Image (cartoon, rainbow, N blue to C red):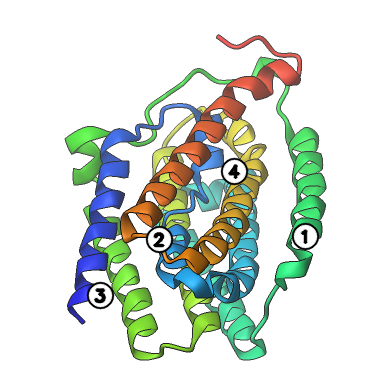
Amino acid sequence: MAGVLLRTAGGTLLYVAFLWFVRIDDWRVAGMMLTFPMLNGMALVSARENADASGQSMVPVVTLNGVMCFLFALALAWSETARAHPLVITLVAAALWICVYVFLEKANAIVPVRTWVAYVAAWTLACVALTVWLWPACSTAVAPSPIRAGGLAGLTESWVRILLFAGSLLLVFGFAHVYRNAHAAVGRLGALPVVPLFGLYTVGSVLAADPAAAAKLETMRSLVPIGWLFALVFAVALAAYVANASRDKPAAIKYLAVLVLGWGMCLGAIVASAKLAPLVAGCVTQ
């Protein structure tokens, strides 16, 4: 059990470091960051040689998280009532997520490893199509504005989510420790939407009394599918790598390095894509 507590503490420290360094003040980046793959990366690295089995059950939940975030963003964009009551709509989203999650758990839903490439390819086409369809006109693009602070202020405003993230890690690692063969359940638990739900709540809270909310949401929602796509690619790529690398039984530090590198690449791709998207769409960035 000491190992469970140690991994929980280490994973939480990584998350705290992420919150310290990441400041979001661009609504395109906000849309893409909603599904940033924090918890699922920790779960896959912990699974080691069973990462394929965990990944098969994780992918449907990652898909659920992406759909939830996209629908949440649409609700905020289309409804003034939703923007005025961010806590209520967050609780509704959480309740709906739990209902679908229970169904996936009972059905033991998986996306088999052999279909991952086709699955990602299909979702890539769908996400690109949604982004092109929803991309706002250049005239509606909004200037950057504070969404979440980094540094000490970022930690102060995120203490609840830090506690929930630590609790989620403890649940995942503790479950994996007690039920050593429940790889599918560990995969689903590893996709708990702690980061997405709090990200959505943060966005909703910022927009509650913002006269420019409609334009900001139009900018944000168009890139939610691309941000989720990065999370999906991250999950399947990391699961495949960890399962393959585990055959050689590498040291734990190698898994940690790969996890941090994966997060860094995902974050870099999100920021770069948010900067390049307006150029691709014919807009000139400010």
Q: Which is more N-terminal, label 3 or label 4? A: 3
Q: Which is more N-terminal, label 4 or label 1? A: 1
To which residue does mark 1 refer?
Answer: 119
- Residue 94 visible at all: no
- Asked if the residue under mark 2 is in contact with the one under mark 3, i.e. CB atoms within 8 Å, the reply is no
**For mark 4, does the 10 Å Cα neighbourhood hold few (<14), some (14 to 19), or many (20 or more) residues?**
many
Across and down, in percent, residue 83 comes to 50, 47
To which residue does mark 4 refer?
Answer: 227
| Local SS, label 2 | loop
**For mark 2, does the 10 Å Cα neighbourhood hold few (<14), some (14 to 19), or many (20 or more) residues?**
few
Q: Which residue is drawn at 17% across and 77% down?
A: 2
Q: In which quarter of the image is the C terminus?
A: top right
- Asked if the residue under mark 4 is in contact with the one under mark 2, i.e. CB atoms within 8 Å, the reply is no
Q: Which of marks 4 and 3 is in front?
A: 3
| Residue 260 or residue 211, whichever sits in front | 260
- Asked if the residue under mark 4 is in contact with the one under mark 1, i.e. CB atoms within 8 Å, the reply is no
Separation (CA) of disc 3 from disc 2: 19 Å
Q: Which is more N-terminal, label 2 or label 1? A: 1
Q: Residue at x 49, y 29 (%)?
A: 211
| Local SS, label 4 | helix
Across and down, in percent, residue 108 comes to 64, 86
